[in-house]
Image: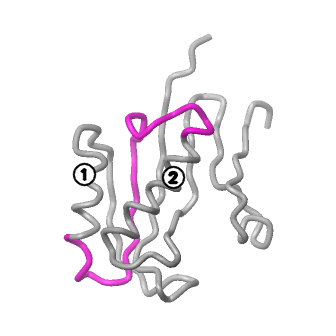
Amino acid sequence: MSGIRRISSGGAYEDVIGYSRAVALPNGLVLVSGCTAAGVDGPYDQTMTAFGVAFKALAEAGLGPEHVVRTRMYLTHARDVDEVGRAHKSLFDAVRPAASMIIVNGFVDPTMVVEVEVEAFKEVTR
């Protein structure tokens, strides 16, 4: 498709699995793949770091946190809901995107307790 921009973060799994960190569509929608925080302890810090990875990809597409319209947070433990929610609120309280928080069985790296996805939109002016 013409006008689609694929953004790489240089992550090790991008080439192995065959994905892009983000895909910017010509209509102004940017989809950011799942972001994690290997080597970071605690659900709050992992969430903040993972959203930081997503924000870096958005910045490459010319968008910021204020353009986020949907977030998805995948957690391995229900006990982490409050800490992940606190991190989300600190980043998005003024933005208020549609959000989902889903408990999953686990991730590729067992030290990870949260993975986040972001969708953002900025109207294209012609």
| 1, 93: nearer the viewer | 93
Residue 94 falls in image quadrant: top left
Name the residue type under label 1.
Answer: Ser
Spatial separation of the CA atoms under disc 1 and disc 2: 15 Å
The residue tagged 2 is 54
Q: Is residue 44 left or right of residue 22?
A: left
The residue tagged 1 is 90
Q: Which mark is residue 30?
A: none
Write down the region rendered in magenta.
59-82
Question: Quick check: 102 above or below 71?
Answer: below
Look at 56% across and 52% down and name the residue there: 32
Look at 29% across and 56% down and name the residue there: 88
Look at 37% across and 76% down and name the residue there: 75
Residue 46 falls in image quadrant: bottom left
| Model colouring | one colour
Question: Quick check: 59 above or below 126?
Answer: below
The quadrant of the picture occupied by the C terminus is: top right
Name the residue type under label 2.
Answer: Ala
